[in-house]
Amino acid sequence: MRKIIISDIHGSYYTMKKLLDEVKFNPEEDKLICLGDMCDRGKNTKLVWEYFYNLQKDYSHHVVLLGNHEDMFNLALKEARYNVLDNRRQDHYFRNNGLTTLQSFYPEATIENRRYYFKKFAREYKKLRLWLKKLQTRYESWDYYFVHAGVDFNKNFWNQEHRDIIWIREPYLSSDKKYDKKIFHGHSPIREEPYYDIRENRINIDGGCVYGGKLNIVIINEDGSMLFQQSKQLEEDSYK
């Protein structure tokens, strides 16, 4: 079974689908591993979330991890529903392009009416909301570890702080420490060729697609060989 790994799609549904079609992704025979940050910044978060929701509903072997952007969405949604006097979570999320996600469901959403549309989302997309809430934060295969952002190498892979798993940059990115397996991660965009970074201890596949870079798909074949497939963000996914 091939492993096909993708990260930091950020609403770029048509770019993602182009790559999956190019590598002839077969949901029955391949394992797709998404490292999070499916939402925000691009136009088509709704399509991306629904794609992965339906994929996991139909095929239980695929893996979808929580990114910091999904975590921000979950926290903002909870605040909008239950804490009428507080806007800090929503403000933080919207400073990180959260409005693009809400508008992919409700084009008329604005910063001013966001609480109304968060509540509307919670009612109308209950199954999707619960799926987002339950996304796992890490995954281990026999040959690699997988997270969204990184780890604290001073701790066991399965004994990490939630915030580190989805937010960490330093000292993780500069560390030469390593586990018994390499770590696949995204979160920290590589904004120049080759738009990925392979180290002795980790592989960063966030190609900064929404910043003018590329969206990466990594194929790990059964013999362990690794191939990269890349694409610039397609126009239909971009606000530019």
Image (tube, rainbow, N blue to C red):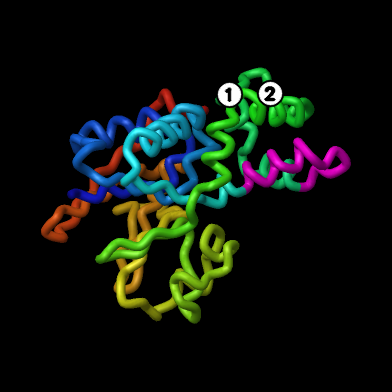
Left or right of 40 in this view: 47: left
Q: Quadrant of residue 104?
A: top right
Residue 61 is a magenta residue: no
Residue contact at pointers 1 and 2, CB within 8 angstroms: yes
Q: Nearer the viewer, mark 1 or mark 2?
A: 1
Q: Which mark is residue 105?
A: 1
- Separation of disc 1 and disc 2 at Cα? 9 Å
Residue sitting at 69 percent across and 31 percent down? 118
Residue sitting at 71 percent across and 42 percent down? 78
Image: magenta residue range: 72-88
Q: Position of residue 199 (x, y in %)?
A: 31, 69
Judge whether residue 240 can be spotted in this image: no
**Residue situated in front as seen by the camera: 157 or 88:** 157
Q: Which mark is residue 79?
A: none
Left or right of 71 in this view: 215: left
- What is the crowding at mark 2: few (fewer than 14 residues within 10 Å), some, or many (at least 20)? some
Judge whether residue 156 can be spotted in this image: yes
Q: Position of residue 87 (x, y in %)?
A: 80, 42
Question: What kind of element bears circle 1?
Answer: helix
Q: Quadrant of residue 114?
A: top right
Disc 1 marks which amino acid? Phe
Q: Which residue is mark 2?
A: 109
